[in-house]
Image (cartoon, rainbow, N blue to C red):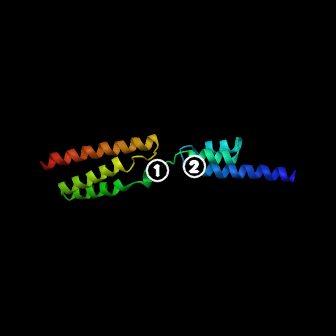
Amino acid sequence: MGYNYFYIVGWFGASLLVGLLGKDRKIGFAVSFIVSLLLSPLIGLIVTSFSARVIKVNQRSNYKVYKELGAKAEYKDKTNEAIDHYMDALYHLENDYKNKKISKSQNEKRLQHIDELKRKVEELKKKSA
């Protein structure tokens, strides 16, 4: 009875650790945990390690700095400087996420930010002309 209990607790604990590793991956905690619990923690670890990592938008927010600088320049009526900063923000939004796996909702937010910044740049270009 003692060894069986040890194996069950060890199996469950290892599956829990694999699930925690899957938390930041596309597969998620629940699927990683269930796969490792039902099949084996080793198989769960392999499946989890082959799952793509999910990059949170907050971790890659270089564009926010330029967006804030653009808003500050716009507030000071420095239109050309604001346009430059907004264009830098657009550059980061369009290029920092290439070849990166992000969730569908994060990509939709990214595209909304791009549209918002493009409208802002066009508005400022009309204002400066």
Residue drawn where x is 40% and y is 41% of the image: 108
* Residue that mark 2 sits on: 23
Q: Amino acid at mark 1?
A: Lys
The total number of labels drawn is: 2
Give the left or right position of residue 44, taking residue 81 as reference: right
Q: Position of residue 77 (x, y in %)?
A: 18, 57
Q: Position of residue 11 (x, y in %)?
A: 74, 49
Marker disc for residue 14: none
Closest to the observer, 125 or 19:
19
Closest to the observer, 65 or 100:
100
- For label 2, the SS is loop
Q: Amino acid at mark 2?
A: Lys
Q: Position of residue 67 (x, y in %)?
A: 30, 54
Give the left or right position of residue 101, taking residue 36 as reference: left
Q: Position of residue 4 (x, y in %)?
A: 83, 49
Q: Is residue 109 visible?
A: yes
Say few, some or many: other residues with alpha carbon within 10 Å of mark 2 (under 14 / 14 to 19 / 20 or more).
some
- For label 1, the SS is loop
Q: Earlier in the sequence, mark 2 or mark 1?
A: 2
Give the left or right position of residue 67, taking residue 22 as reference: left
Residue 74 vertical position relative to residue 113 in the rendered view, above or below: below
Closest to the observer, 17 or 39:
39
Q: CA distance from mark 2 to mark 1?
A: 12 Å
User: Going by the picture, which residue comes out furthest to the left?
Assistant: 129
Q: Is residue 29 visible?
A: no
* Residue that mark 1 sits on: 56
Say few, some or many: other residues with alpha carbon within 10 Å of mark 1 (under 14 / 14 to 19 / 20 or more).
few
Give the left or right position of residue 111, taking residue 129 as reference: right
Residue drawn where x is 30% and y is 42% of the image: 115
Q: Quadrant for residue 33, please give it.
A: top right
